[in-house]
Amino acid sequence: MQQHVETLSVVELDTNDDVSMVWMFPAMSPALQKVVVERTCLATVNPPAFSFSRFNSTWQYIFTTADGPSAALPRVKKFSLCSCSQVFNPEKQLQLLRLLARVYSESGEPTKVLKGIFYANTTGRYELTKAKIDTWVAADFEDKRAKLANCSLKKFVATFKMSSIQIWLAVLLKKRVVVYGERWSEVFPIVRVLPQFAWVRGDWSILRPMVMLSSELQRKELEASGVYIAGVTDPSIHGRTELYDVLVDASKQRVVISDDAKAMLAPAAVHEPLAQAMVQLAASPKETNNNLIKAIVKKTNEYIGGLQKLSGGKKLTMQMLQAKNLKLPQRLKTFLFNLALAEGKA
């Protein structure tokens, strides 16, 4: 039986403008408590209605109300419900949190919210009324579909055009990618779409969609993760080149490569056909996101298969690439070696 919600907490902004976690079940670590409170953004003027991110091995999903004080919560301006899970599925969590937020707003009783969690975890279903909008069914939100939901690789490539090949390289070679936007609504769709460039890995655990650079705790966790695709709205990121190899500026629709990563992420001539194919597929109204992903997967698998042939099943070294006297440009040899490193084959 899948535990859809492992931990639930309530964070409130009261009429004195104090923000605090007032309830949680079961207990969570002090570090995770602090991160959850920070990521509610309740201390800001316009907190996002829904956000999702990851801290260590745990996904956090946060739904924030904008109703103001209710009869049951007269001293609460706004509140956030946060669910924690080991599974990436924002849409599934959002629908459940919406319903639980109504329960808390109307009752002010965490125990009634807890009862809803028990029903959800044990039956995979939760209802406020028989209306579809008031019903949550876990089976309606397949986890594998979350990797494609509410984001568009076609839209990203159509926006960033030939620069998209550098993002493909960065994700494939396991570099540090940071997405900057002025609003979280700009950031989230881009962050969650970028792992599709390396669909062959299926790894969404590298995502850190919401990171506050002002938080030492969040920043240190990000740096410790080593490889990541992170989202920020702090403009100071432009001067923090130690935190990224690639910066995707959603507001200005441009890609910035750090000086240290420029040599590694410079596309070889052999990559140009893929870059052009991606742009053409993205521009065509007849093509789908799936078609674009399949084209990238096909080319990626060709490169990975080529590594196997070059290494003969052994760990690949740059010396091996040079010794084979291959008639390949040096930039391509460097790419193949870095790909072998990323795939654990060097």
Image (cartoon, helix red, strand yellow):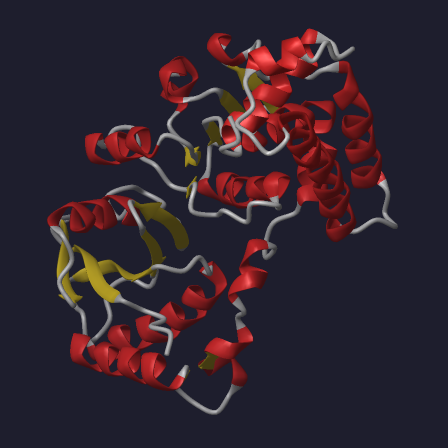
- Give the residue at x 73% y 28%: 161
Q: Where, by quadrant of the figure, is residue 66 drawn?
A: bottom left
Q: Position of residue 234 (x, y in %)?
A: 37, 27
Is residue 168 depicted above or below 320 in this figure?
A: below
Q: Please state if 25 lies on the left or on the right of 99 as rendered.
A: left
Rendered image quadrant of residue 50: bottom left
Query: Is residue 93 shown left or right of residue 314?
Result: left
Residue 193 picture location, percent across and down: 58, 44
Residue at 49 percent across and 7 percent down: it is 259
- Horizontal and vertical percent for residue 272? 79, 21
Q: Does 84 sit above or below residue 98?
A: above
**8, above or below 133, in the image:** above
**Residue depicted at 54% across the width and 69% down the height:** 142
At x 46%, y 29%, the residue is 178
On screen, 208 above or below 166? below
- Left or right: 184, with 271 as reference point: left
Question: Residue 291 in the image: x percent, y percent?
Answer: 78, 49
Front residue of 26/110: it is: 26
Which of the pair 22/201 is nearer the observer? 201
